[in-house]
């Protein structure tokens, strides 16, 4: 059994398949006295949650309030070894960087066990050059009459520089991160993009886009096509979009494998 020291351990568990956890991640999480699964910045499929329990032991799910106001979590970490397990890589979300800083301010050791993230999976799987990706964005659900235009504005800025964009899709239509998440579907995502494009007076219908679903799992699916083609795709659980900039010859050939 691996020995762990008192403090907070941020443990990456990979992209949504427990089998993708590193040996170190399994050993550290299993050795900690308290285990929590962060459940609002990313999701683990229900079937995988049961496997995670068998792999590392019992755990409790934490939603946004308990992570962003982590008094109880850090209180435990002052006297015991605490694992906060995060889908993907723990430091992919600034939420967990903030948690590191809070731990430091309280004199609590905080260690990181990195995991496979969507960022590295997508670029490799599609065959696009990783150094040609610009700023990553998240496409949020509209909240009432509020529809943020900044995600599409950032895509346009990337395209102006001939850079690709990884667009993560929102998981929480309430924006609160307190209840069971509802991942945005391709239909909803394209609808939001069309509404935003109308505000910005941009035509996105001729763009080539790539829908990536359940990446890093056995259900992984990649489809390349127009907004209209992607909007009717059903199935899958967790999705993201890649909106390419200008493609070189090899990238064109790579994407041709996934055409709708």
Image (tube, grey):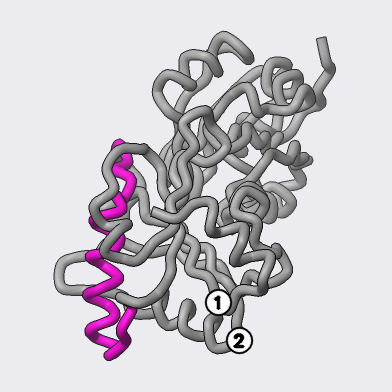
Looking at the picture, tell me which residue is in the foreground, 68 or 13: 13
Q: Position of residue 170 (x, y in %)?
A: 37, 55
Q: Quadrant of residue 134?
A: bottom right
Mark 1 crowd level (few <14, some 14–19, many ≥20, 10 Å Cα): many
Q: Which residue is mark 2?
A: 161
The stretch drawn in magenta includes residue 181:
yes
**In the displayed structure image, the side of residue 44 where residue 232 appears, left or right:** left
User: Does residue 12 appear in the picture of this structure?
Assistant: yes
Verify CB contact (< 8 Å) between mark 2 and mark 1.
yes
Give whichever of 248, 185 is nearer the camera: 248
Q: Give the Cα separation between the discs numbered 2 and 1.
A: 8 Å
**Residue in the picture at 75% in, 37% down:** 113
Position in image of residue 143 (x %, y %): 22, 65
Q: In which quadrant of the rendered view does residue 207 lie? A: bottom left
Residues shaded magenta: 180-204
In the image, is residue 195 above or below residue 75?
below
Which quarter of the rendered picture does the N terminus lie within?
Answer: top right
Q: Is residue 146 above or below residue 168?
A: below
Identify which residue is drawn at 55% across, 18% down. Answer: 52
State the residue position of label 1: 245
Tally of numbered tags: 2
The answer to which of 88 and 232 lies nearer the viewer is 232
Q: Is residue 169 left or right of residue 58?
A: left
| Residue displayed at 26% across by 64% down | 228
């Amino acid at each position: 059994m691996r020995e762990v020291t008192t403090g907070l351990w941020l443990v990456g568990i990979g992209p949504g398949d427990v089998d993708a956890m590193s040996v170190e991640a399994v050993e550290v999480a299993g050795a900690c006295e308290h285990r929590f699964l962060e459940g609002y910045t990313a999701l683990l499929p229900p079937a995988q949650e049961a496997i995670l329990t068998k792999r590392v032991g019992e755990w409790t799910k934490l939603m946004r309030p308990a992570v962003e106001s982590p008094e109880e979590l850090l209180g435990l970490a002052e006297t015991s070894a605490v694992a906060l397990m995060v889908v993907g890589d723990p430091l992919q979300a600034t939420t967990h960087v903030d948690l590191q800083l809070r731990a430091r301010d309280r004199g609590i050791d905080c260690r990181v066990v990195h995991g496979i993230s969507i960022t590295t999976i997508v670029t490799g799987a599609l065959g696009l050059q990783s150094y040609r990706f610009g700023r990553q964005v998240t496409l949020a659900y509209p909240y009432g009459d509020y529809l943020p235009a900044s995600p599409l504005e950032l895509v346009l800025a990337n395209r102006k520089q001939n850079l690709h964009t990884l667009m993560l899709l929102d998981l929480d239509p309430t924006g609160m991160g307190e209840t069971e998440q509802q991942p945005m579907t391709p239909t909803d995502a394209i609808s939001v993009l069309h509404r935003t494009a109308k505000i910005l007076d941009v035509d996105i219908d001729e763009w080539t886009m790539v829908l990536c679903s359940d990446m890093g799992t056995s259900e992984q699916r990649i489809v390349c096509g127009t907004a209209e083609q992607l909007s009717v795709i059903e199935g899958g659980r967790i999705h993201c979009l890649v909106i390419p900039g200008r493609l070189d010859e090899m990238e064109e050939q790579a994407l041709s494998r996934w055409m709708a």
